[in-house]
Amino acid sequence: MTAMKSLPFSVGKVTLTVQDLDRVSAFYQQAVGLHLLKGDAATAELGVEGRTLLELRRDTAARRRSPREAGLFHTAFLLPSRSDLGRWIKHAMETRPPVVGASDHSVSEALYLSDPEGNGVEIYADRPRLSWQWKDGQVHMPSDPLDIDSVVASAGDGRWKGFPEGSVVGHVHLQVGAIPSAEAFYNGILGLAVTCRYPGGTFYAADGYHHHLATNIWNSSGAGERAYPSTGLANVEILAGADFIDPIRSRPIKPEPASATPQDLSLRDPWGTKITMVTQAAENI
């Protein structure tokens, strides 16, 4: 299976603002399986192979985000293989983290959790790309029951040892206030292709993936712009080549006043969710 980080467009890291840093960090290490790479009293960086996939920032004064607001629906961590997902499920059966759902999406198999502060989490493995069904630019991506026994059987005798080499953030799913405005931003401004539509949800991708980002109104229809400081999603980092990012600069957007480097581009969607585009050389992605 091709690792997501080898593609010219991918999600880099997700940043969350949390009130209880120790508790949330422990959840992502113990229940999810991320490795602590670096941490202090204010932040924790978690990931694999020295690559940060999730950054947690402590802000005890931040208001607690409502589940009806715009912001994060879930961060989706992509495992390299079905057998890795099977090993994670075996681990979950022993440790009993707060799993809230499981689905077979045809393109992938997934389980869902909620962290201690209500941030959604997906842990999934893709099926081979040649098995994905496309028609008129749209991928078949249902939400069918997951055959958990079959996934567990694929693990064999292997034991879960935390996120394996090659794990990445596969996609990020967002809550928004309205689908037409979301499509105008993520398709029209960012230039991502619409790859699938559900009632109340739209999925977007580059490079023929099923989705790198998604937006829905299932909990947040009519939501207005987010009020900060609040817990929840602080930033989604997107890694892409200059040929993808540079055209965005000429579109009708209002960039954030400062970026980490002149090559980066930070902007906010219509609900104030921050997206940072980071220019990468093709060999580094």
Image: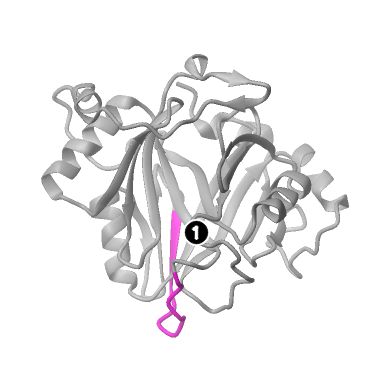
Prevalent SS, magenta region: loop
- Identify the residue shown where x is 62% and y is 27%: 138
Q: Secondary structure at mark 1?
A: strand
Q: 269 left or right of 39?
A: right
The C terminus - image quarter? top right
Classify residue 76 by image quadrant: top left
Q: Is residue 235 above or below residue 243?
A: below
- Identify the residue shown where x is 52% and y is 32%: 4
Q: Position of residue 119 (x, y in %)?
A: 40, 61
Seen as rendered, the residue at the extreme front is 199
- Tally of numbered discs: 1
**Residue nearest the observer in this picture, 78 or 45:** 78
Q: 187 left or right of 199?
A: right
**Residue nearest the observer in this picture, 8 or 192:** 192
Q: Is residue 218 above or below residue 136?
A: below
The amino acid beneath tag 1 is: Leu
Residue underneath mark 1: 72
**Residue nearest the observer in this picture, 107 or 274:** 107
Residue stretch in magenta: 54-66
Seen as rendered, the residue at the extreme bottom is 61
Q: Position of residue 213 (x, y in %)?
A: 58, 45
Q: Position of residue 29 (x, y in %)?
A: 28, 54
The N terminus - image quarter? top left
